[in-house]
Image (cartoon, grey):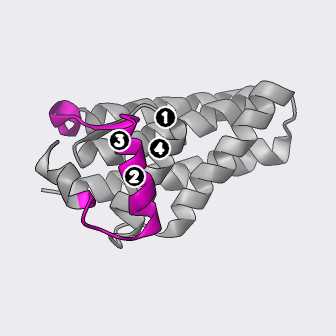
Amino acid sequence: MSSAAASLYGKSRSANQALRECLDKRKIIFFPRAKGLAKKELLAAEEDLAEARDRFGHGKYKYATINAYYAIFHAARALIYSKGYRERSHYCLEVALEALFVDEDLLKSRYVRIFQDTMALREDADYSGSFSKEGASMSISNAGEFIEVARNLIRSFP
């Protein structure tokens, strides 16, 4: 186990307990090459957001919603990559955001809620065929904001 991962075991907050469980199950792993991939993930986020906007413009609200979620997913991934971790679960990615960024006062908890809400909209669109113009629009707006915050955070790290 890395020293970064080991330091998480000393913390007592609930998000860190969930992160420890994700680490134990290897759904979050320490990945030394991750830091070098953060910018690539931000580019993927931007591409997904551009695709979401294009699909929205063509009235394809289901796929606009799905692409907007993946824009947020890749931006969230870029954040945890910037800390040297890689996820193997959407849930554990959410947990890592909470433990590594919100609990460390680097990110407002609202961004974890954006991740959760947009994931729920994506799941509804993907698995239930339930989607709307309003949901797609909100997802796209949230994705743009999330990417910008992630980009600024990553730039601030040494």
Q: How many marks?
A: 4
Q: Amino acid at mark 3?
A: Asp
How far is the residue under mark 3 from the one under mark 1? 13 Å
How far is the residue under mark 4 from the one under mark 1? 5 Å
Q: Is residue 101 left or right of residue 68?
A: left
Q: Secondary structure at mark 1?
A: loop
**CB under 8 Å between discs 4 and 1:** yes
Residue at label 1? 89
Labels 3 and 1: the sequence-earlier one = 3
Labels 1 and 2: the sequence-earlier one = 2
How far is the residue under mark 2 from the one under mark 4? 7 Å
**CB under 8 Å between discs 2 and 4:** yes
- Quick check: is 5 in the magenta stretch? no
Quarter of the image for residue 155 reads: bottom left
Residue at label 2? 19
**CB under 8 Å between discs 3 and 1:** no
In this view of the protein, can residue 148 be seen by the observer? no
Q: Which disc, if any, is residue 119? A: none
Residue at label 4? 92
In this view of the protein, can residue 107 be seen by the observer? yes
Expressed as whole percent of the image width and height from the top left, the position of residue 13 reads 40, 70
Q: Secondary structure at mark 2?
A: helix
Labels 2 and 4: the sequence-earlier one = 2
Q: Residue at x 30, y 68 (%)?
A: 11
Vertical relation: 64 (above or below) 118:
above
Q: Secondary structure at mark 3?
A: helix
What is the crowding at mark 4: few (fewer than 14 residues within 10 Å), some, or many (at least 20)?
A: many
Residue at label 3? 24
Q: What range is drawn magenta here? A: 8-36
Q: Amino acid at mark 4?
A: Cys
